[in-house]
Amino acid sequence: MADDRHHRGLGTPLLEHLVDTAREAGIARFTAGALASNHEVIKVLTDLGLQVTRNFDGPEVHCVIELAGTSAYADAVDTRGRLADPASLRPLPAPRSVVVIGAGRTPGSVGRACYATRVSADSPACCAP
């Protein structure tokens, strides 16, 4: 990945997608290689919530990632998902006012989710739907 794309939260969701696709295809494990000094990549792999075996070989580390589902993996995916939704809205400019069209009273609607996220971010709301 290009250096200007690091630390944007792209690697973990890509790995999660790869895990799901591999599981559906019957793949039981991945192997990954990295420089042993690349602590960020090693952390991304170990933070997935899957069993990772690391073997250091000089300046390199070889990781074997077991794809068998674990409760730790499910919990980690759930936690990342709950944190990613509000975080994805942070880069938006802080408007002086917000208009949400379609916020209705239907639970689960996109407009309702936008409204709830905005209100839960301690933003002033002039009225409720």
Image: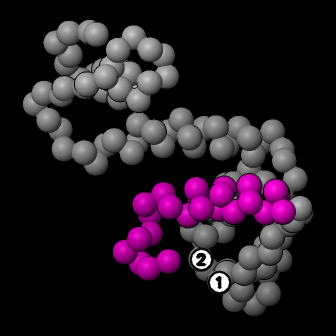
**Residue 57 image offset from top left, x and y in percent:** 79, 87
Q: What amino acid does circle 1 point to?
A: Leu
Which residue is depicted at the point 82% across and 56% down?
24
* Picture quarter with the C terminus: top left
Q: Would you identify the image quadrant in which residue 64 lies?
A: bottom right
In this view, 67 is above or below 34: above
Majority SS type along the magenta span: helix
Identify the residue under disc 2: 38
Q: Residue furthest left?
A: 96
**Residue 94 image offset from top left, x and y in percent:** 17, 38
Q: Residues within 10 Å of mark 1 (few under 14, many from 20)?
A: some
Q: Secondary structure at mark 2?
A: loop
| Tag count | 2
Instruction: Tell me the number on the disc at residue 58.
Output: none
User: Is residue 35 visible to us here?
Assistant: yes
Q: What amino acid does circle 2 point to?
A: Asn
Residue in the foreground of this view, choosing between 85 and 53: 85
Check contact, mark 1 vs mark 2: CB within 8 A: yes
Residue in the foreground of this view, choosing between 28 and 102: 102
In this view, 106 is above or below 29: above
In magenta stretch: residue 17: yes
Q: Which residues are magenta?
A: 1-25
Q: Residues within 10 Å of mark 2 (few under 14, many from 20)?
A: few
Left or right placement of residue 106 versus residue 63 in this view: left
Identify the residue under disc 1: 35
Residue in the foreground of this view, choosing between 45 and 24: 24
Q: Would you identify the image quadrant in which residue 97 lies?
A: top left
**Residue 13 image offset from top left, x and y in percent:** 58, 56
Coloring scheme used: one colour
